[in-house]
Amino acid sequence: MSKSYSKLFGDIHNHNAMGYGVGSLERSIDVARGHLDFFAFTGHSSWHDMQAMEGGRENHWLNGFEVLRNGWAKVQDLIADANSDGEFAAYLGFEWHSSQFGDQCVVFPDDHQPMAYPDHISDLRRFCTEKNALMIPHHLAYPRGERGVNWDEFDECCTPVVEIFSEHGNSEEDRGLPAFFNHSLGGRQTANTARAGLGRGLKFGFVASSDSHNAFPGAYGEGLLGVLAVDLSRVAIMDAINNRRTWALTGDRIEADFTVDGNVMGSVIRTGPSIEVAYDVQGRDEMDVVELIQDGRIVHRAHADPDGSLEQAMADKFQIRLEWGWGPWGDLALERICDWAFDLKVQDGRILRAFPCLQSGPFVEERRHRIVQSSETDMTIQSYSGRKGAYRQNPNQSLILELQGSAKTVLDLHMTQPSERHAKSTIGDLFEGSDNLRTGEFPQENYQWHRLVPRAASRVTGKLDLDVGAGPSNIYLRARQYNGHIAWASPVFMNHD
């Protein structure tokens, strides 16, 4: 369905100490290059209608804005130097706060651009239009007037997409998980959800990004963006976003193909009284359900087939997740940052692809995750984990491997940190159940090979005809795995002017 496009993954909304987060911009760039195809740094720039707070707490924001202003020349140079077409795309940006109009992330297509400090969203939009920049509202569903989206002010001219998921939570609707609870801005307002915006006849695609404040773009579980791009370049990625060829992800790199009458996600088309919808969703874990939502109503549900024999599973590629962390409890005064090192050899099989799932916490400026595949059978992993500062209190890191092999294929895992351990796990055994391993006696950290996920259990495909009226209509795809991770493919808009 999208064979002419590459599927790329990135994060276009994140922070560090060049603002009021932590960590250097150099760290952000290094982390992004380590596990993403593209990223935009969007430093905190201003909040024109911020009210004074008890005890002068507004200085938390004001001081961060000053840091970015003073460092803007350095930011421009570092982002320009980080870009390398064909290998990695880096974008310059900033975040504009507004209680009245909702926060907006500005992302430039070009290097060495100025920031803007308008007091009204129309002036910010004029600036973005002149610069051909994106202007993306985020954490939509906070209450209007409290930095939630203001749909009355929406204009698609430089806002082709909206951010429906980040570390704040899910803005698609007011009842979907994960809920808003990370910050003190309150719960979700129904009228500010993405579903409500679509219900008003507005046209926009879906993106997600982390909004991580730990100098960690692409933080697992905090939000990730997928794009259909003709190549790995800034021009191509920006074209994909402007044309809404985007899907939003909570963390796992679910691959979503979704067409209406042969038109890819984000398209605006004219139709007759019926449409043909086709989809192909490849999850990174067992798929729970794939849903089509037309004009705010679920019109179709499909499920994977988790059953099947070992022989059937071995006839196709399959996936296995390696997870490490857990860690000593803070209640036992044993909380720590744990360094990990693994050497993996695959015997009688091969690694096709690897998908990192790396959490943003704990924050340590100099620490990095390094996952290097040196051949189809060999991989090294350096990582760290810890409970302190972990997103939603989950300290774990993980890696998903897409493999080909047989029941006799062996995953030979040699761990040298935090302790010396050597374990061999066969694919046949992992088809039956997980392999749970310890770094030492209780309550030390643990690691685990999860149960094998056959392709039939992680992939859902379908094609069907649906009725559509003569008036404006929209339809989008939502996919959810058993582990809770979600993907939202941008809507296709039908019969809009």
Image (cartoon, rainbow, N blue to C red):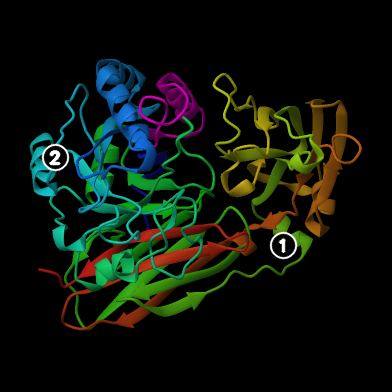
| Residue drawn at point x = 35 percent, y = 51 percent | 207
Left or right: 101 with respect to 182? left
**Residue 421, percent from left and from top:** 87, 30
Residue labelled with disc 2: 128
Q: How crowded is mark 2: few (under 14 residues within 10 Å), some or many (20 or more)?
A: many
Q: Nearer the viewer, residue 133 or 400?
A: 133
Q: How far apart are marks 1 and 2 (CA)?
A: 53 Å
Residue type of the residue flagged with mark 2: Cys
Magenta residues span 14-39
Q: Is residue 262 visible?
A: no
In the picture, the quarter occupied by the C terminus is bottom left
**Residue 156, percent from left and from top:** 16, 55
Helix, strand or loop for disc 2: helix
**Residue 154, percent from left and from top:** 17, 58
Q: Nearer the viewer, residue 336 or 352?
A: 336
Residue 312 numbered tag = 1
Assess whether mark 2 and mark 1 are in contact (beta carbons under 8 angstroms). no
Q: Which of 110 and 232 is in front in this view?
A: 110
Residue type of the residue flagged with mark 1: Gln
| Residue drawn at point x = 80 percent, y = 33 percent | 413
- Mark nearest the camera among 1 and 2 is 2
